[in-house]
Image (tube, rainbow, N blue to C red):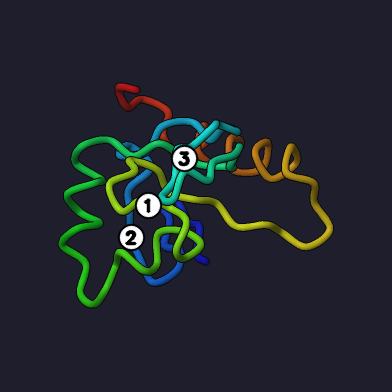
Amino acid sequence: MRLDAVGISLRGIGHIPWRDLRAPERRYVPVKNDIGGRCTVMPLTQRAQARVRMQPGDWQLRVGPRPYLSFDQPFLLLPGVQGLSEDEVVRLFHHVWSTFSTGYQR
């Protein structure tokens, strides 16, 4: 995982600019095989979705925990961070996102 002023790289996907992401959140995400639950995600804009699909290699296997996350989900699944709760992870990513996406249309 890499976070910087330009954007985020995660699970071999990126660099996705902050302006192409929405604020992180805990959201119910429908997944394959009728298994679903709340996940910590950053919704992707259409431009980010296109950028992810253009990544070399099998990006579909890197966007979430296999085999559960449906390949067409418009979300970047955020990782757990050792020592932080899921709420703290959301706050951490929200802080970074809000710091670097300021001035961009959300």
Q: Nearer the viewer, residue 58 or 98?
A: 58
Q: Are marks 2 and 1 in contact (CB under 8 Å)?
A: yes
Residue occupied by mark 3: 42
Q: What's under tag 1, amino acid-wise?
A: Val
Please name the residue that numbered disc 1 is placed on: 6
- In percent of the image, x 43 and y 53: which residue is there? 69
Which label is found at residue 15? 2
Vertical comparison of 98 with 52: above or below: above
In the image: residue 73, left or right of residue 78: left
Spatial CA distance of label 2 from label 1 is: 8 Å
Q: Residue at x 50, y 57 (%)?
A: 3
Q: Can you give x and y, in whole percent of width and height, for residue 87 in the image?
A: 74, 37
Q: Is residue 1 above or below residue 16?
A: below
- Position of 27 with respect to 53 (left or right) is right
Nearer-the-camera pick, 101 or 26: 26
Looking at the picture, how far across and down is residue 88, in whole percent? 75, 41
Relative to 94, does residue 15 appear above or below in the rendering?
Answer: below
Secondary structure under badge 2? strand
Disc on the earlier residue, 3 or 2? 2
